[in-house]
Amino acid sequence: MTVESYATGLRCIECGATYPLAYRLECDKCPGLLELTYDLDELGRRGPAVFDGPGLWRYGAVLPIARPEHRVTLGEGQSPLLDCPRLATLLGVKRLLIKFDGSNPTGTVKDRSSTTAVAAALQFGYRVTSVVSSGNAGSSIAAYSTRAGLRSLIFVYERASAPKMLHIGAAATDLIIYKGVYDDLIGHWDRLVEEKAFFDCGASRNAFKQEGKKTLAYEIWEQNGFRAPDVIVAPVAVGETFIATSRGFRELAQLGWIDKAPLMVAAQATRANAISRAWRDGAPLKPLKIGYTVAEGLASGNPGKKGEWTLRLLRQNGGIAGDAEDEEILEAQKILARTEGIWAGPTGVATLAVLGRLLAKKQVDPARTICVIISETGLKTEAEVPSRQGTAFDYDSLRALVHSRLAQ
């Protein structure tokens, strides 16, 4: 059964102006960013039974794509929500859940927003998509565009990891490598968006793209026995995952399906921490000039309007922001693999590193149920490879080695 969309239009987050359900990136009156609206009254009457089928499009009722033929998919969504008792014990936390989005088709949370972005491109009649990326968004938009039969212009910075670059080169119709970081190119690229050279698949403004990540909230709620965790730790570059997940839980609260939305924690890399710095200092958002961070997907020093939106949500709802150094992120990567068997990339585990810092500072209550979003697989990143020098064994030497190891 195809799930009907209950999307009704767009609303400006600044002035409240409303618009019909059309491709629009900003309000004509402010210009503020836009968010999608839904008939929540009818959804509330229908109840959770309105969700049907597998994968992300099970939640089509709260996504803005009406026609089934536009709902491009590679089987994204329904990523595992894992109870992690050994890691919880190590951190001193009562209950720790990992939402591992590295299981998505291209190995990243970006697939949630790529499917709705490319579906919207089809819905609004575009034949070309584009994105400026540090790697993950590029491979994801390329894959979904190809799946939909669309041309893709993927701009990727020169220091993106080799696995991501190989993936993009294979899937994209056009791979363009640029010097510098995301902030150096995005302003010029946005001007081409205004000229309608291609459909905007970026994270800065497009409400239709962002909406796919809202399904994180709905999945976590369902997988946790139709209950919201007490705390959600979400990765933040410009804030798309944070905003979308927050909105998902807000809708669930408005529908009366949860008592209240979770405490939201925004996790950044210290080398790109404009939002957490502003939150900590009680100051306005100030763009930073950044260099390289191992958390490539968080490498945005100027998060723009979505950064302002994220900061506003943090302050309005009593949220928390934090950041972690590259060394802490890499250590969290090792700990997650060795305690729970989850191999995630540095961008993905920044959330875990930040949680560790916040627990040490007593800013997060360890007695609560905490859910950490791990946004990518470790198979998409470059890391130091263990020594490949082999040993030739006979039975006696092999037996001696095995018994010596087991005795340790």
Image (spheres, grey):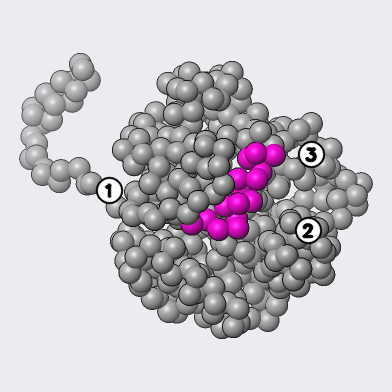
- Note whether residue 150 is visible: no
Identify the magenta region. Answer: 302-316
Please state which of the two labelled residues, at mark 1 or mark 3, is closer to the viewer: 3
Q: Position of residue 205 (x, y in %)?
A: 62, 64
Dot 2 falls on a residue whose secondary structure is loop
Report if the CB atoms under discs 1 and 3 are less than 8 Å apart.
no
Residue on which the image places disc 1: 383
Q: Position of residue 371 (x, y in %)?
A: 57, 33
The type of residue carrying mark 3 is Ala
**Residue at coordinates 67% horizontally, 57% vertically from top-left?**
211
Q: Position of residue 386 (x, y in %)?
A: 20, 42
* Magenta stretch contains residue 314: yes
**Residue at coordinates 40% horizontally, 42% vertically from top-left?**
270
* Magenta stretch contains residue 12: no
Above or below, 261 relative to 136: above
Dot 3 falls on a residue whose secondary structure is helix
Counting residues from the N terminus, which is met first, the one under dot 1 or under dot 2? 2
Residue on which the image places disc 3: 253
The type of residue carrying mark 1 is Ala
**Residue at coordinates 76% horizontally, 60% vertically from top-left?**
12
Query: How far apart are the two marked residues, 1 and 2, measured between alpha carbons?
Result: 47 Å
Query: How far apart are the two marked residues, 1 and 3, measured between alpha carbons?
Result: 41 Å
Query: How far apart are the two marked residues, 2 and 3, measured between alpha carbons?
Result: 23 Å
Q: How would you rate the neighbour count of disc 1 (Cα within 10 Å): few for under 14, some for 14-19, many for 20 or more?
A: few
Above or below, 388 relative to 259: below
